[in-house]
Image (cartoon, grey):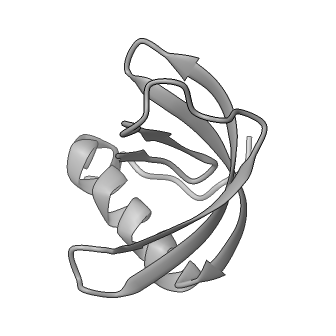
Amino acid sequence: MSLSSTGVLLKPKRQSPDLNKEILLAFNLPSEEHVILSVKLIRTTSKGIAGKIVKVCQGEDALRKYLFETHKHHHAKLYEQGNFTTELI
């Protein structure tokens, strides 16, 4: 599973999933916090099924923290002192 703040990419067990269907997706983050998402399946890609997050039913704060920490880890240079700004342009 690939996860962002707005959507997910899933690897289905079935070859022809029912698109335009809303599903509940439950999983644990690496911190062991439980997250439940309501996801609307949108389209099939060569990598899996793309879905849009409709609602975070449980674990919203934990998910937000996880996504931020993951972004910070992958883009550490953006967060080095002097490179990060909170000012609006």
Q: Nearer the viewer, residue 39 or 20?
A: 20
Residue lying furthest top: 46
Q: Nearer the viewer, residue 89 or 5?
A: 5
Relative horizontal placement of residue 19, taking residue 34 as reference (left or right): right
Point 34% across, 44% down: residue: 78
Relative horizontal placement of residue 66, taking residue 85 as reference (left or right): left
Quarter holding the C terminus is top right
Q: Position of residue 20 (x, y in %)?
A: 78, 37
Q: Position of residue 59 (x, y in %)?
A: 52, 84
Point 51% across, 53% down: residue: 85
Establish if 60 lies above or below 9: below
Relative horizontal placement of residue 22, taking residue 74 as reference (left or right): right
Q: Nearer the viewer, residue 85 or 61?
A: 61
Q: Position of residue 22 (x, y in %)?
A: 74, 53
Residue 75 appears in the figure: yes
Point 42% across, 51% down: residue: 84
Point 25% across, 86% down: residue: 32
Establish if 66 lies above or below 79: below
Q: Nearer the viewer, residue 14 or 75?
A: 14
Quadrant of residue 19 in the image?
A: top right
Establish if 15 lies above or below 85: above
Q: Position of residue 34 (x, y in %)?
A: 40, 85
